Image (cartoon, rainbow, N blue to C red):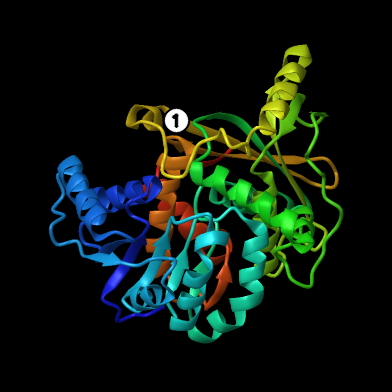
């Protein structure tokens, strides 16, 4: 981290849909933070700044604007020198994030993103982990709905398992009980870009298939594939594949690895959507499975598009985490969030994670998951400032 930097945080991509929501959050909730807005076009940045000021009633005239573009590595290097942390919403990251990650790693500047692209993340780990460790930069991937509520949900239920059973357990199930609000246009674009990259490079396909793609030199036990409708005996419910499990499970395993495996080297974790018992539950699970196939289609949401304010406000999610001990005993915990997951909640999570990271200087340089870096401190902050609720059931 750069303690004497001009800005605490630069919101890079502030003219995009999600970036604007992040900027609104800073304007509403953090008037004392030294922050700036960054993007490709100075006029658009100025217009968005004015719109946010009018919307929030915040004093925005003094918020600096920085022109930086993924096509200009020099502009990115200049930008990162000015901040303790750069928060980037400019994805797909495999297309627009590599030079920024490299610049932050070199400069010792913290970098946070919303990445859900495990093959690119592994490439960045291989390329920049050592440099970030040397410079002190904390590079933190996946700071939105993928994968903070899941990664911290596992951490939270394992804390309770340790209290009750004397140690964390080797098996946790992550289950989506309810959710209103779709995935972001950036998530859909990232999926399309990842599938296209896999078609060009077989190594990327191997990363996508590997549950331990983000734990270099470590491969744990066989994991549930989670790709088919199944009945969960422990929960008495049919389950459907969860499209974000492909990134969340990788981040959970990396988190365990970064923390020196408190869950054990034999840890098993999967994610599914609960659809209920009986024929109705089975039919719902099959319908979700069919809908998942359309996620990467060109007809999905586009980057820069998103739901209305009313739709964001009406959104929510309810996640269940079940820690299962070897003798069959269980601990259950939930993570609930207000606002729609892909935009309203995500924008608050990445903003608060950036500030939490800045407030935690003892986290060493390197490439992190948010949960492994910040653990209970981030749980407390998200509950206080980002509309999340963690609870033992």
268 relative to 371 in the view: left or right: right
Residue 186, position as x, y percentages in the image: 50, 46
Which residue sits at x=59%, y=77%?
128
Q: Residues within 10 Å of mark 1 (few under 14, many from 20)?
A: many
Q: Quadrant of residue 239?
A: top right
How far across and how far down the image is residue 276, in percent?
A: 70, 20
304 vs 268, nearest the viewer: 304
The answer to whether one can see residue 295 in this image is yes
Residue 174 x/y as whole percent:
68, 41
For the C terminus, the image quarter is top right
- Please give the residue where the numbered disc 1 appears in the rendered image: 315
Looking at the image, residue 88 sits to the left or right of residue 40; the answer is: right
**The quadrant where residue 264 appears:** bottom right
Q: In which quarter of the image is the N terminus?
A: bottom left
Q: Which residue lies furthest to the top in this view?
A: 279
Give the SS element for disc 1. loop
Q: Nearer the viewer, residue 238 or 190?
A: 190
Q: Is residue 35 above or below residue 233?
A: below
Q: In this view, does 123 lie to the left or right of 152?
A: right
**Who is closer to the viewer here, 161 or 178?**
178
Residue drawn at 45 percent across, 56 percent down: 90
The vertical placement of 140 against 331, above or below, is below
- Asked if residue 151 lies left or right of residue 81, the reply is right
- Name the residue located 32 percent from the left edge and 48 percent from the top edge: 20
- Percent across and percent down for residue 184 are 49, 41
């Amino acid at each position: 981290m750069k303690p004497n930097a001009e800005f605490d945080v630069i919101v890079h991509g502030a003219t995009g849909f999600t970036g604007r929501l992040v900027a609104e959050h800073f304007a509403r909730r953090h008037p004392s933070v030294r922050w700036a807005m960054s993007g490709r076009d100075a006029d658009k940045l100025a217009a968005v700044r004015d719109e946010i000021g009018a919307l929030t009633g915040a004093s925005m005239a003094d918020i600096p604007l920085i022109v930086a573009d993924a096509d200009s590595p020099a502009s990115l290097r200049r930008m990162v020198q000015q901040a303790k942390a750069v928060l980037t919403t400019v994805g797909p990251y495999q297309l627009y994030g590599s030079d920024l990650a490299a610049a932050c790693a070199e400069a010792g500047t913290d970098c946070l993103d919303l990445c859900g692209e495990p093959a690119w993340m592994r490439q960045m780990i291989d390329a920049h982990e050592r440099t970030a460790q040397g410079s002190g930069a904390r590079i933190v991937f996946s700071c939105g709905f993928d994968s903070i509520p899941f990664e911290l949900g596992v951490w939270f239920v394992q804390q309770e398992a340790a209290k009750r059973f004397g140690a964390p357990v080797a098996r946790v199930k992550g289950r989506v009980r309810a959710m209103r609000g779709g995935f972001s246009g950036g998530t859909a674009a990232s999926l399309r870009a990842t599938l296209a990259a896999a078609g060009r490079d077989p190594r990327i396909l191997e990363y996508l298939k590997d549950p331990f793609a983000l734990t270099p030199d470590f491969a744990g036990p066989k994991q549930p594939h989670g790709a088919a409708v199944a009945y969960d005996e422990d929960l008495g419910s049919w389950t459907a594949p969860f499209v974000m499990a492909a990134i969340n499970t990788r981040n959970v395993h990396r988190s365990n690895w970064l923390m020196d495996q408190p869950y054990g080297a034999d840890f098993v974790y999967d994610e599914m959507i609960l659809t209920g018992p009986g024929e109705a539950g089975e039919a719902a699970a099959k319908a979700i499975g069919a809908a998942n196939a359309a996620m990467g289609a060109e007809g999905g949401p586009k980057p820069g598009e998103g739901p209305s304010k009313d739709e964001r406000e009406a959104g929510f999610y309810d996640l269940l985490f079940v820690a299962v001990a070897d003798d069959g005993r269980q601990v259950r915990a939930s993570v609930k969030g207000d606002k729609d997951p892909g935009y309203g909640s995500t924008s608050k999570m990445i903003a608060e994670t950036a500030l939490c990271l800045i407030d935690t200087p003892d986290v060493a340089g390197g490439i992190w998951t948010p949960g492994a870096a910040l653990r209970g401190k981030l749980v407390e902050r998200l509950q206080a400032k980002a509309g999340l609720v963690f609870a033992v059931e």
